[in-house]
Image (tube, rainbow, N blue to C red):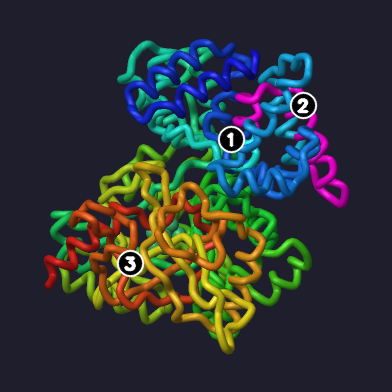
Amino acid sequence: MKFAEIAQFFERMEGTTKRLELTEILVELLKNTPSDVISKVVYLIQGKIRPNFEGVELGIAEKLAIKSISKSAGIPIKKIEDAYRLGGDLGITAANVLKEKTQTTFSTENITLERVYDTLFKIANLEGKRSQDMKIRYISSLLNDATTNEAKFILKILLGTLRLGIAENTLIVALAIAFTGEKDNRELIENAYNVSSDLGHVSEVVATQGIDGIKKFEISVFSPVRPMLADRVKSEEEAVKKFQTEFAAEYKLDGERAQIHKKGNEIVIFSRSLEKITQYYPDIVEKIPNVLICDDCILEAEVVAMNENTGDFLPFQELMHRRRKYKIEKAVSDYPITVNFFDVLYYDGNKTIELPYLERRRILTKIVKEDRFAKMIPMSIIKNEGEVLEVLENSINSGCEGLMLKMPQSPYKAGMRGSNWLKLKREYQNELGDSLDLIVVGAFFGKGRRTGRYGTLLLSTYDSENDTFPSICKVGTGFTDESLDQLYQILSPTVTIKKNSRVESDMDADVWFDPNLVIEIVASEITLSPIHKTAYDVIRKNSGIALRFPKFTGKIRTEKHIEDASTDEEVIALYKSQKKSI
Ligand code: AMP
């Protein structure tokens, strides 16, 4: 397949914001794509080359892209940087710069989708000393043979700035229409995606085997299942009102969610955002096969750091010491953990996700042979507010964050946030009540003790409808010397020349970052503000929503993707519930 064809489709998609039209163009593209390359096209549409859980990242820095353009066009770096500062996107800048060049050369080669994809794949897998040079060579050679339109999209994919406005849902609907002729089949395709987290693979199945293939699609060990998520409630009254029946209360532990896949003695662990985290937990890999009474399974657990002497749970941050490349054995002995199971999604040929919660819990109890390292999360069946308060108190006294309340009859709804699971945290009982997970998009340099580091951070929510990051507050409190250092180390390599096009803010930050990092914030109140952009014009014309007295809690949430950060809708809901309680 010619890459020019794909670039033309991308161009058309960029030109419309109408969902229906976008879906139509997408359907046309999918129908025009041979089934042996459909998965590659589906990944590229999403701006990636493999499903997220494989961790194949392009991660090209702007500087490297600029060097490659310079090499291909024979134009000095400085000139490209200047053009980029004036113009919008680096992809477009490249297209303009290269236009001058292609007008003077004779012809360009026809590049194929396969060539672009394979080159991107090679670039993503390059490591080591000479990798930068090799990357420049690969990119400039692609650009040499590319038309201006192709070059624009190649660069956008490389830089991670391709925004076709296509949410996963739109892609799923388009797959249903293109390969089954019926939009209503979207649910079946969505289910397949929810249990495999791989839309490329799902598209291959539906393109080659139609809806029958999708109906037979099975959950399978080593393909991560998209996690079921919980709605939040502010009080025990709210929980009791929502359930209207007796329900299960489990402790909510403050650790890292781990989806543990086991086949024989082989173990793979996925995080909440479905990244492979097996390498950080060699102790789980070693010990877990001995405590599970089954051959194959997919289980969910909360991994929590603990004090081995007292047996107390330690806060989530302790686990982050394990996020290192080298000397992991030392981290394992310095930061011991326990694995606390709470769900079973599959075991020995049995799909359990469709079973009611209580049945899954019964099976889980049979599979897990508890010991000091592996435990079941405590659970009790309760029905009234007094009982909720009693369990909440016990959970907090044992160092937990609060409760997860679960509907006894509910199946495991992969990939969904809903009211079958409710979370009730201790902080919900006061002030704003909740913490927010916000994205760091910019910073202001510090003074005094904070010189040379970022003294104040500019934070954004995630606007999932528009796929943008509107600013919600500046935060300068709650930092320790250690956290300021740590944040500087994480953030400084992600500084960009100018504000990312998905960030919405009128502020004049000293530095801008590639949105990458999520941190946890508490605040005393949610207010309306003309300065910030979250939920702009939603509650009041010319106003956004802002946080009053925001404070960093100390939690750097590296396990969360930016798309998992608090959304505009969540903040609007909090604003409204705050109004009600006043
Ligand atoms: P939050 O990250 O605040 O949205 O809370 C949801 C997270 O709580 C899940 O992703 C799990 O990592 C964690 N968690 C702790 N205890 C439980 C439990 N008993 N059941 C489900 N999730 C739990």
- The answer to whether mark 2 and mark 3 are in CB contact below 8 A is no
Could you tell me which residue is drawn at 64 percent across and 13 percent down? 1
- The location of residue 89, given as percent across then percent down, is 56, 41
Could you tell me which residue is drawn at 18 percent across and 57 percent down? 540
Q: Residues within 10 Å of mark 1 (few under 14, many from 20)?
A: many
- The answer to whether mark 3 and mark 1 are in CB contact below 8 A is no
* Mark 3 vs mark 1, CA separation in Å: 50 Å
Ligand 1 quadrant assignment: bottom left
Q: Is residue 563 left or right of residue 98?
A: left
N-terminal label among 3 and 1:
1
Residue identified by numbered label 2: 144
Residue identified by numbered label 1: 92
Q: Can residue 412 be seen in this view?
A: no
Provide the secondary structure element on which disc 1 rests: helix
Residue identified by numbered label 3: 403
Question: Residue 33, relative to residue 255: is it above or below?
Answer: above
Could you tell me which residue is drawn at 33 percent across and 48 percent down? 417
Question: Residue 447, relative to residue 106: is it above or below?
Answer: below
Looking at the picture, which amino acid does disc 1 mark? Ile
Question: Residue 305, relative to residue 420: is it above or below?
Answer: below
Q: In this view, does 82 lie to the left or right of 42?
A: right
N-terminal label among 1 and 2:
1
N-terminal label among 2 and 3:
2
Is residue 147 magenta-colored? yes
What range of the chain is rendered magenta?
126-154
